[in-house]
Image (spheres, coloured by chain):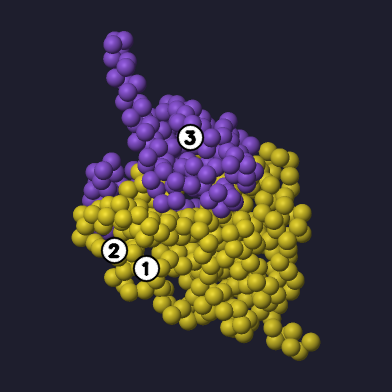
Amino acid sequence: MPKTLEPIKIKREAELREAFLKEVIGMPHGEKIKNCIQCGTCTGACPVSRWMDITPRQVVALFRAGMIEEILHSRTIWICASCYACRVRCPSGIKVTETLYALKRLAIDKKIFPKRFPVHVLSEAFVSNLQKYGRNFELGLGIRYYLATNPLKLMSGARFGLSMMKRGRMAIRPSKIKKVREVRAIINRARELEGI
Amino acid sequence: MEFAYYPGCSLEHTGKPYDQSVREVFKTLGITLREIEDWNCCGATMYMSISKTIAYAVTARNLAIAQTMGCDICAPCNSCYTILRKANRYIAWDPKVRDKIRSALKAANLTYDGHVDVRHPLDILVNDIGLDTIEKRAKKYFDGLRVAPYYGCQIVRPVKHFDELDDPMTMDHLLSALGANVVPFADKVRCCGGMLMTTYEEIALDLNNELLLNAEEGGAEIIATACPLCQMNLEGYQAKINEKYHTNHSMPIVYFTQLLGLALGIEAGKLGMDTLLVKPKDLKLKSKDKKVAA
């Protein structure tokens, strides 16, 4: 890209950042993020903070400093399993989980993740099931996921799938709803409304 | 008493025993469950990570259909339960979200006013039916069976509903009423990792190993769950955990509704007990008549 275009890009980034900050602060109780006292209760309450490169407390600090990019490139947003432990323990009532969801959405939107990234592969497969059938299809999801991320794991996955199938706990075919068109119409309309 | 039943995708297959036991227990206790016709996936945490509007709108289709049925929803899966409730909450809180959901539903000729309550079977059983009634109706009891009550995370969070956020007791009381010895279990609302078992297996294995170790340390012979994802992670990956951590876990993971069903005298097969991967050895299930005779 020619160098002359750079300032424009930076300006856009800044605008995006501002819009994003506004979105998070604008959600119900979102403004409470301004009340963070950096006590670290969120990090202590989080069952997976041990594996994070940026702890939930640091996420809030970086967020408030406007350093969104740092968080978007972290492993943290993908590790959060949305258990809401941070959210209920926070003495300032900050919606940490919702903030992480918003950051995850932004990262997916801007495609900030490695190629064949497991989290993205899984959510793509999940979403495509929902659009095709209206419901999740566990077997199809598993096969698609492992083929795209780690085909070697298909073997152990297959063993598990078979043992579940024997017990009637895994279906070979997806269960498709009758009015899947309705679901698609809702999704399409909602997609148009997302940015507004 | 009647509810619009939302089983959710997990309960169709991997969580089948949960579906079977909820239906059987409710039938026995005289609660009618009318399955929401042609329900769709709630979107789970997946859609929330991609698009907030789509996530709410997809979930709301189920709420809209339930509205036409004229009764509240019963949703046994913790994840569905929390997503459906969250959609309701944001519809009430945020006019922008509400308008977008309305507009998206309109594309399918559906409407939703935001007034269908979403209830968990644990809440309905203990708070609507009541422990007294359940105790009276029980034909059998678990003679001191040491159970760890595992609620999972999303059943009580993020907003307080029918039980405490940090130390819920509903399931404890229910299991005690059935004669079980509910052991102390500090991890009762600690996350099992959910989908991390697929995306970051090493993290989820560690989380579940800890849950199993802590339940064992409390003296549990069995873990009772209220969520198909917790059940699946704890039960389905025990062999893998044993291999990785050189442990000897052999912990049966059952749904609380399976235990309740057995106490109500429902046949084990109808409750999906035969489809468990780790079978309970001895549930210490005794007939109440004998207790009286003794």
Q: Are marks 1 and 3 in contact (CB under 8 Å)?
A: no
Residue B35 location, x and y as percent? Answer: 37, 69
Structural distance between the alpha carbons of marks 1 and 3: 36 Å
Q: CA distance from mark 3 to mark 2?
A: 35 Å
Instruction: Please indicate whether residue A150 sits to the left or right of residue B51 in the image.
Output: right
Image quarter (top left, top right, bottom left or bottom right) of the C terminus of chain B: bottom right
| Closer to the eye: label 3 or 2 | 3
Instruction: Give the vertical position of A115 relative to B107 (above or below).
Output: above
Gap in angstroms between the C-alphas marked 1 and 2: 9 Å
Residue at image location 32% in from the left, 48% down from the top: B54
Mark 2 secondary-structure assignment: loop
Residue A87 visible here? no
Location of residue B283 (image quadrant): bottom right
Position of residue B238 measured from the top left corner of the image (x, y, whole percent): 64, 48
In-image side of B163 versus B39 (left or right):
right
Q: Are marks 1 and 2 in contact (CB under 8 Å)?
A: yes
Q: Are marks 3 and 2 on the same chain?
A: no
Residue highlighted by disc 1: B116
Q: Which mark is residue A63?
A: 3
- Is B59 above or below relative to B50? below
State which chain is coloured yellow: B
Q: Amino acid at mark 2?
A: Tyr
Q: Chain ID for label 2? A: B
Q: Which residue is mark 2?
A: B112
